[in-house]
Amino acid sequence: MADGDSVQWQWLGGDATVWPDKAWMRRTTGFFVVVGLLATSCPLFRIGIADSGSALTYGGRIAGFTIVFVAVVVLIAAAAAVDFWETRRWRYSGVVVLLGVVIALLCGISLLLLQIGENFTLYTVIGIALVVWASIALFELIKSRAGKGLSIPKNIAIGVIISTVLAAANLAYSQIYVPYVTTPLIQTGAAFKESNIDKRTGKLYMTVHMYVRNAGQVPVYVLGSTYWIRGEPAKSKPVDKESRSELIYDGEFVRPDGHVLNPGEEVAQDAVIEVKDPAPGKFEAITAQSEVYVIRKDRMRMTGNYERARVVGKSLKESLEEGDPPNPQYRFRTGISNSSEILNATRGPQCVTVWRLGGKKPLVLVDVSPPDKRIRFDLERPPLDQRATERYGLTQVRGAMAQTPYPGLLEKAAADKGAAPTPTPTPTPPPRPQLPAL
């Protein structure tokens, strides 16, 4: 044979449906690839369908539709795997299978990354299994030269990539990033109104107006509200030691519990406060202040009936465990769902717990944690769960302190002396039907 002559080989064992190899090994490999792709599509369909219809944000629903599309691609890849390991009648079957396996690998890596710092769940196992399976399948596909036959002109590929990246970046910024970083603007405050002295008992009654307003663009749940009326002590001499203010009254002013405060909405209440012994010189001034605890409605939803989840009295005392706050007035505890199904899958079940402590310094504590995790109460611990603050926009909003001079209040009340208004009763809510333990 002369130099430069070409050599041609021809297979004479059959047509394109016949493979010159061990059929059982090839079909076993194809079977495990098909099973892996089908297993990948199942959680993708579950998450995508759930988010496309019920995610709390526009970005979450777009992500849901995207995941459904990806799941369809993986199903097509499973069908292409049958062709690739059997007849190879379709030129691009290997490329489609390669794409499906790469998607499975990225899904597994994403699940594991989202699991960092979270509880070990079923999706942690799924993520590990996907990464191991996809890595082996990818190695086998590369060895089989599955990408052979794919030829896309470079100028077309570059144009498609640039256009896709720009469109995705614009959508992510306008519909996902901007709404996510928009912070709620919640305003709360208190103001003194009229005052009166009962001519029969000599008691002083004053009306205090409390309000909370959503002046922003983000709806919120009001998890708890409280206000304090204090008497600032009079100082007879400049050298006297500083005296502490006296708590005259404290209570709640937002009903119902767990009220949804939409943008532009306001909740207000007037409370009639009684001062039993309004002796001249007893106080220098009367102060009032309100505080609310809110959580973003676009990042979670209540799965239980928060309004009926209040536990008080004997039931509360009997349910207390080690690490719970001492002598709480009430407790709320109900399950919550994240803004998207992918977050539910990676974070697992979550509960929000709200405690109110009485005494001279009333305090509200809020925690978001898994149902089986006990949060230990610590006086040195911040009153808000910092992790929940970052994830769910849990916020403590305290209004500016309203103050009125006590002598002027007495003088005005004496001028309007008459029948006493009905004072606001001390909040002692009756026990409510209990939800089943979570």
Image (tube, grey):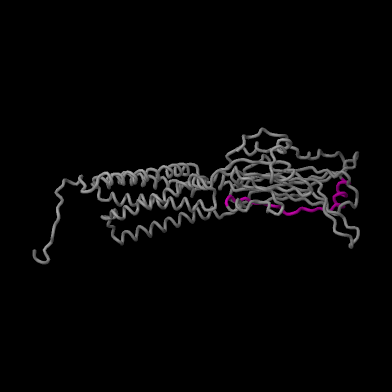
Toward the top, the furthest residue is 433
* Magenta-drawn stretch contains 416: no
Question: Compared to 142, does 309 lie above or below?
Answer: above
For the N terminus, which image quadrant?
Answer: bottom left
Q: Position of residue 239 (x, y in %)?
A: 89, 62
Toward the bottom, the furthest residue is 3
Q: Position of residue 340 (x, y in %)?
A: 51, 46
For the C terminus, which image quadrant?
Answer: top right
- Name the residue nearer the viewer: 165 or 244: 244
Left or right: 68, with 359 as reference point: left
Q: Position of residue 350 (x, y in %)?
A: 58, 44
Q: Name the quadrant containing residue 27.
A: top left
* Magenta-drawn stretch contains 399: yes
Left or right: 321, with 277 as reference point: left
Toward the left, the furthest residue is 1
Tell me where the magenta segment starts and ends, as one range: 391-415
Q: Position of residue 409 (x, y in %)?
A: 85, 50
Left or right: 80, with 165 as reference point: left
